[in-house]
Image (spheres, rainbow, N blue to C red):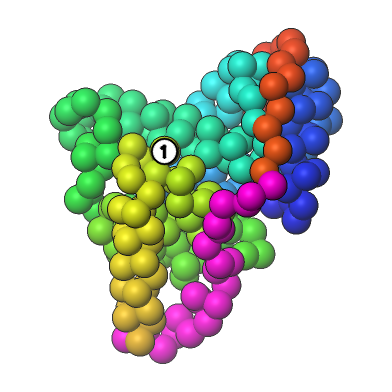
Amino acid sequence: MLGDDAELTTAVLAAQDGDETAFRTVYRAVHPRLLGYVRTLVGDPDAEDVTSETWLQIARDLERFSGDADRFRGWAARIARNRALDHIRMRGRRPAIGGDETELTGKPAESDTAGEAMESMATDSTLSLIARLPQDQAEAVVLRVVVGLDAKTAAETLGKRPGAVRTAAHRGLKRLAELLDGDPDAAGVLDALPPQREPRADAVTSAGVTHMRARTQKDM
């Protein structure tokens, strides 16, 4: 992940202007966390395919996006969630019931390893423990702490109120702490997670939109 949100914002704008190198920069910055989120939704075996479909839609629709790094992360997470819901429906694992957050609530998380998705910010043990949370808590924790969304953007992604997301994330982190108490081998896992992001008062929004040609996974 890029340490400076201004860099990611700049890269997104350049990618919208057709800069292939900038698009690869965006991909490498956002993909690991996005993959970790998808894994909490569909499980490890299918996460790569669903995330690839997510990036194909991002590439196709990027010229219509407007916003800074924070908004881009939220936009990408919403696309990933929609693709995950579509995948779940196609597998027939749950009936289609409207596409809101209730479709995933209560579904056991299947992810048990995602080291590369967390890069240096967490460990395999982290997502393994998150996978043991109720689905609403798992999604809130991953979106807030792993993907790096503030409560408002995470709430928009999930179709919930910011307060509900904050509560779910708080309960999820509290439950993770309880799980850690019972697992001496997992010491330090929560220390690997970054703090939850809060909204920035000086967030910059860009309205510039230009043409960008479609990209494939090979380009990334």
Frontmost residue, 213 versus 112: 213
Q: Quadrant of the C terminus?
A: top right
**Does the magenta-highlighted stretch encompass residue 17?**
no
Q: Nearer the viewer, residue 78 or 43?
A: 78
Which residue is at 48% across, 55% downward? 144
Asked if residue 184 is among those painted magenta in the image, a careful observer would answer yes
The residue shown at (33%, 37%) is: 159
Q: How many marks?
A: 1
- Whether residue 82 appears in this view of the structure is yes
Percent position (x, y) of residue 14? Answer: 81, 26
Mark 1 — residue? Answer: 156
Q: Position of residue 18 (x, y in %)?
A: 79, 18
Above or below, 203 against 175 in this view is: above
> Of 155 and 212, which appears nearest the observer?
155
Residue type at tag 1:
Glu
Circle 1 packing at 10 Å, graded few (<14), some (14-19), many (20+), is: some
Answer yes or no: is residue 52 visible: no
Q: Position of residue 56 (x, y in %)?
A: 57, 23
Residue 106 position in % (x across, y down): 20, 50
Q: Main secondary structure of the magenta part?
A: loop
Residue bounds of the magenta highlight: 182-202
- Could you say whether the residue bearing mark 1 is in a helix, strand or loop? helix
Q: Residue at x 36, y 40 (%)?
A: 158
